[in-house]
Structures are given as structure tokens and as C-alpha cells.
Image: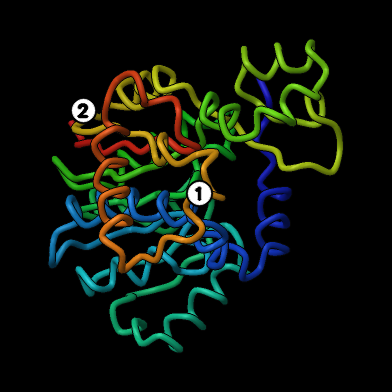
Amino acid sequence: MARYDPDWVRAHYDDSGSREWDRWDDSPVERVKLHVHLHYVRRYVRPGDRVLEVGAGAGRFTRELAAITDRIVVADLSPGQLRLNRDNAARLDFASAVEAWVECDLCDLRPHFADRSFDTVVCTGGPLSYVFDRRDDALAELHRVLSDAGTLVLSAMSLWGTVHQFLPSVLETDPSANRRILSSGDLTPETIGPGRHYTHMFRAAWLRRALERAGFAIEAISASNCLSVGWADLLEGIDETDPTWRQLVEMEIEACREPGCLDMGTHLIAVCRKT
């Protein structure tokens, strides 16, 4: 099993800078993915909730959370991303909704947060995909800081959805490396070589088992963009004010919940209750 390297993750996201904000607008496919994520954030985060946003990055979801509640704690491993989050909060006027910005490791939140400190934890965009062999530790920490019956809104990178999106380059990869990736879900120096983006990609069944093993009851599980992956050129000319765009997002939300579609978006989204 690939091992978690927090120093690599910290450096990677320090170097990413504002791309962690901008990437959600890189293409229509990314914007669809954002809207599907936000559907679950807006549905399950309640006004007045005290929210821990882990792996918050530059604040794209923090701004959305601030429209719901003014009791947010922002947490990230990357000091560079935390600075951007704070700067964006001041620039876009959502800083008053943030109680604190905390540099911390998802796998060990004890130095910073007491048991049952939060009504809701939001962990979107894939932080769980970077902790590799410590995913059970990370989920145990998210469970610990939640109040009884608290809510977790989480997303992680999808194995088959990533293959779906990047099939041409996958087919150019050595078949033996592909077999190792498909069996483990791990993109590591051993499977894709040095100087690349290292992460663990989940199958829906793997994510479900990990969440249940950690003591969560799954209320909803979804793909992020099963219909629109691969159709960026077709969607490029559709304005978000167009009824066609609204219809696409509605269809994505419905299709992504179908059991047969769960593994076909680039991310898996799960909403869970602490049991």
C-alpha cells in the first residue's frame, strides 16, 4: 500500500497557488462538477451549523458555506492555501463567517479540535485521496470531531471516472502499470513515474466500505459528472444562464445518483451521518 507523505502534499498545494480556486472554472465539465458538489453542500449544511471545512484550499467552497452559516473553521495542510483562503475571504467579503484558519493534518486533528466540536464537516475536492495508507486514521478523526448524529459531506477521486476522462492517455500507459493502478487505485512514483500528481482513487465500493468501517451511515452517494465527462467541446458554447445549462445540471444530479453511474464521474461524493 502506498504511504502518505504530508510533506509532498503540503508542497504540492503550496505550489498550486490560485489554481485551487480557478480549476473549478477551467472547463464546462469542471463547472458541472462544482454544481453537483454544491447541490449536496447546500442540501445538507444547515443555517447555524458549526462547520469544519478540511482541505479547504483557496476558499471556493468556503465562500459557498459562508452563504449558509457564519460558524466556519477553515483547515488545510498547506499554509499557502490558507493564506489564499484568508485573502479571498477579505476580498470577497466572507471573512466574518470564518472563526479561524488552522494549519493541520487531516490524519491527526487532536492538537486543534476537541471531540464533538462540529455539527458538520465538509471535506470536498479530494483530501481523503492524498492520505493513502492513513485513510482510516483520517476518517476516524472526521468521525471524532463531529457531534452525535453530525453530518459529513465528503468527496474523493474516482478510479473508473478518472479512466473515463483520461482514456486516451491511459491507453498509452504500460499495461502492467495500468493493472497495478486498477488493482490498488494508487498513482505513485512506482506506477506513473517521478514528478507527477500522486493520489489514491476510489471505487465506489471501496469508499463505501471505508466510511462504514469508520462508523458512518451513508445517506447519499453520487458521482460528480458522469454525463458531461468527455463533452467539454460540446458544452463550451452553453451559457450558465441558458435553460439548457440548468437542464444539464439537473440531469447530472439525477444520473450521478444511479448505482450504475457512481463510478463514472471524476469524483465520488458521499453524505454521511455519524453513528
- Crowdedness near tag 1: few (<14), some (14–19) or many (≥20) residues, C-alpha within 10 Å: few
Q: Which residue is drawn at 50% across and 37% down?
A: 266
Q: Which residue is drawn at 63% across and 16% down?
A: 182
- According to the picture, the residue beneath numbered tag 2 turns out to be 217
Foreground of the two, 14 or 63: 63
Q: Residue 184 carries which label?
A: none
**Residue 247: x, y in percent?**
26, 50
* 96 with respect to 26 (left or right): left
Q: Distance between the residues labelled 1 and 2?
A: 38 Å
Residue flagged by tag 2: what amino acid is it? Ala
Q: Label 1, secondary structure: give it.
A: helix
- Residue 140 higher or lower than 102, as above or below: above
- Residue 131 quadrant: top right
* 156 with respect to 259 (left or right): right
- According to the picture, the residue beneath numbered tag 1 turns out to be 234
**Residue 243: x, y in percent?**
25, 60
Q: Which residue is drawn at 68% across and 25% down?
A: 2
